[in-house]
Amino acid sequence: MAIVVLLAAGALLALLLQSRHDIDREARNRSVSVAQTFAHSLGLQPALKTADPSAVLQPLAEATRKDAGVDFIVVMDTNGIRYTHPQPDRIGKRFVGTIEPSLAGQVHTESVQGPLGKEIQAVVPVTAPDGKVVGLVSAGLTVKNVSGVVDRQLPVILLAIAIGLALATAGTALISRRLLRQTHGLGTTEMTRMYEHHDAVLHAVREGVLITDGDGRLLLANDEAKRLLGLPEDAEGRHIGDVPCLDQRMAELLLSGRETTDEVLETGDRLLVVNQRPTHPRGRPEGCAVTIRDSTEMRILTSRAETARRRLKLLYDAGGDVGTTLDVVRTAEELAVVAVPRFADYVTVDLAEGVLEGDEPGPDADMRRTAVSGIRRDHPLYPRGRTIDFLPSTPQARGYAGGRAELVPDLAVATGWHAQDPPRARAIVDYGIHSLIAAPLKARGVVLGVVNFWRSQKPEPFDEDDLSLAEELVARAAVSMDNARRYTREHALAETLQRSLLPRALPEQSAVDVAHFYLPAQSGVGGDWFDVIPLPGSRVALVVGDVVGHGLHAAATMGRLRTAVHNFSSLDLPPDEILARLDALVQRIDHDREGNAEDTDGSGVLGATCLYAVYDPVSQHCTMARAGHLPPLTVAPDGTTEIVELPTGPPLGLGGMPFETAEIYLAEGSQLVLYTDGLVEERARDIGEGLEMLRVALSHPGRNPEESCAAVLEKLLPERPGDDVALLIARTRTLGPDRVAQWEVPFQPDAVAAIRNSAARRLDAWGLSELGFATELILSELITNALRHGSAPVRVRLLYDHHLTCEVWDGSSIAPHLRYAATTDEGGRGLFLVAQLSEHWGTRYTPYGKVIWAEQGLPGTGGPTREAPEPDLSAFLDVDPI
């Protein structure tokens, strides 16, 4: 069939290709013939010279087109303007096709997309007696009509192929079905081997096999059946009732023909298990097939094996069900549940107090009942959560102190156990609990607590086999318990360290309104962090980062990087330079750990990611750079949310690659969203899907940062995060023109007084006249230094925010330095004076120079302002009077 299909497909393809080639060639030849005939017609050239050639040629062309069997005949001038066309509205328009070869006297054929669709056309010249081309004629057919011939032939070809395939398929199916029915799918060799194997297996198996017909006649009995039933050699062929030595009950079962499964019959001194099934060789019951096996010797072994199997199954289940989480209480509860009721009727787990906090317990630690499980809830045992101080005479205290399991076969006569709480002990015995195993939870040489197994329903007490099973069960659970304890301790330490290193309260600033969220990972604290850092000039820096790895090392490294970011930001560097310095710092940390011989845990810093953004509320521009971190999102006031196209830098610690910055404009009320990958990445979804979910969750207008934060967490926060989750949402504010004053300073010494007077008037308008004297001195010194030591252009700006900030801009990159001037020096006191009059001062560099700024506290009390300090000018009063 496959060969037939391939041959038919090849023939069909060849026929189609040949047909299309022949028809295309015929269409081109016909187009050339019609076009040449019409071009050499007698009245064509005179008609071209008339005032209206279309009136003469259009009827003639249409009549010729219909007679010649082409789809169009177009007559045109040498510029390609049509005189005729099957669609009259196309007359007077330019011909679609190539006319240059025909203008040169050649016949040209081509395929074009014309007014009638895909066309095959020929263009021939109309030549005057002197050889000059005076017009052009084009004739042709559409591809639709050309392909129609092939399309009409195609159904006949396909029908013939389909009939051939159907005949081949039907013949193959009939022959295959007949062969399969006759041989049951087997060849002669397989059938011979099957009968040989059947005879060998039938007489070799250690299980009796009988086959009877519908009349109760024994057709077959193998050697094992004859041995078990005591049948004679000539039993085959006889009626069941006539077979000598056959047990009466077995004979009745064989003659009944009923279906049985593992029915036990006692025949003589043997215990036989019988399975009987009716046979249906021709669709109707015609006999039975019976199997018989001897279970006399296996009964005792089966009982013991079943007991061992149950115990092994219990240990296996405990290995999978206990310790599924790194939680001490949950592990204790899993241990209590897995042993009830398969091993004990009640199980209680008592842990030392320190274990619940992740610490190693002492020798005399009090016990807290951490887990209780039983077949009933009305038991008189101590409830969960009870603190118990076991007496030394109790099996629990002896097991905890000695590290060995204690077996109490009969609680009614255990005086040492009764001494702990006589009323409750009597209640337990009266309830029916009669036997106890107290097994210590011991792991790595440390006893963490005691597991108590209580028996009530079974009348027999626990024995030594039960004691060994309890020890094995508790030993396996103790490893999981100790892992949970150690994890609890490390997780608590790492979380405490990390939370102590994260910002407890965001600093006061007026550039943005901020909402933030942080959640450590359930599997181990990581190194995610965020920060909001006020910068001079009412600006603010927004930072988010993620240290690779989990645990104490990641948390400590995060603290170092966060401290470094604070220090670098105080230098007022651009974001790309901040990341470059952080990158060098992470490389040094890695190098230091590699050189530390005591650091053998292999937990060196593999890298970190960081995103650093600086927002200016005056210009409303935000400059940012990232080192391997996910890009931020911006939410416009109308709710439009976009992912910022920010150049991707390498993660911190790799080195060798520069970082790039990007600057965006943020309208007032826009939100800038910074986050870590723990928020958007999960096993169940990829990071692209998480980013889209984050974008959708933020795309709502009119929300404040707290509402946006709550919406994001509701949509994306995992139930049990596998990585730290940090989220920072900042809504932008602006410092309006009424809070900003700016002047261009002519590069002349006498310009200082004019700027000083303008600044004084602006301070009066702001109600800050008390700061006028100090501000004028500061501006005088800074502008004079810019004019003397800097370069043009010079600009002054006052910002009225939580502080009054004076900024002087100039085109020089020379760094100013504070120094103490001697008594005889004529200068050198300017910056010292600025430092004394202001709270803070500093320098930041721009692409076009530098800015020297000084901040003064606002006068008055209430809110963020405070009383302005009185400047100390004693250092300038060291000149002797004349």
Image (cartoon, rainbow, N blue to C red):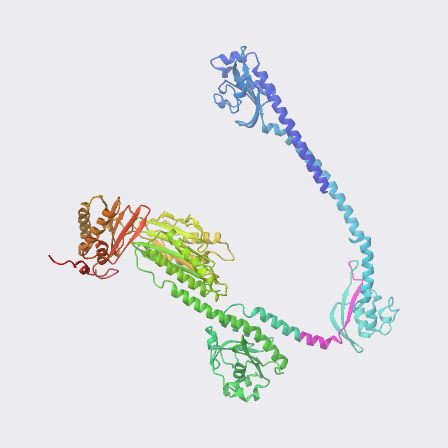
Quadrant including the N terminus: top right
Of residues 335 and 285, which is closer to you in this image? 335
Q: Quadrant of the C terminus?
A: bottom left
Q: Give the range drawn in magenta.
A: 283-306
Total marks in image: 0
- In front: 292, or 137? 137
Q: Position of residue 454 (x, y in %)?
A: 57, 80
Instruction: Place residue 727 in its image quadrant.
Output: bottom left
Magenta stretch: includes residue 285: yes
Left-right relation of 596 to 18: left
Relative image position of residue 69 (x, y in whole percent): 61, 22
> Looking at the rendering, which quadrant does residue 492 occupy?
bottom left
Q: In this view, does 431 lie above or below 204?
A: below
Q: Which residue lies furthest to the left in this view?
A: 882
- Please indicate, yes or no, whether residue 768 appears anywhere in the rendered image: no
- Does residue 589 show up? yes
Q: In this view, does 773 lie to the left or right of 453?
A: left
Q: Where is residue 31 in the image (x, y as percent from the top left)?
A: 59, 21
Instruction: Look at the picture and state if 54 lies above or below 718.
Output: above
- Residue closer to the observer: 221 or 808: 808
Q: In the displayed image of the protein, which residue is found farthest to the right?
A: 234
Q: Is 640 covered by the magenta stretch?
A: no
Task: Choose between 748 and 414: the one closer to the eye.
Answer: 748
Q: In this view, does 270 lie to the left or right of 20?
A: right
Q: Residue furthest front?
A: 824
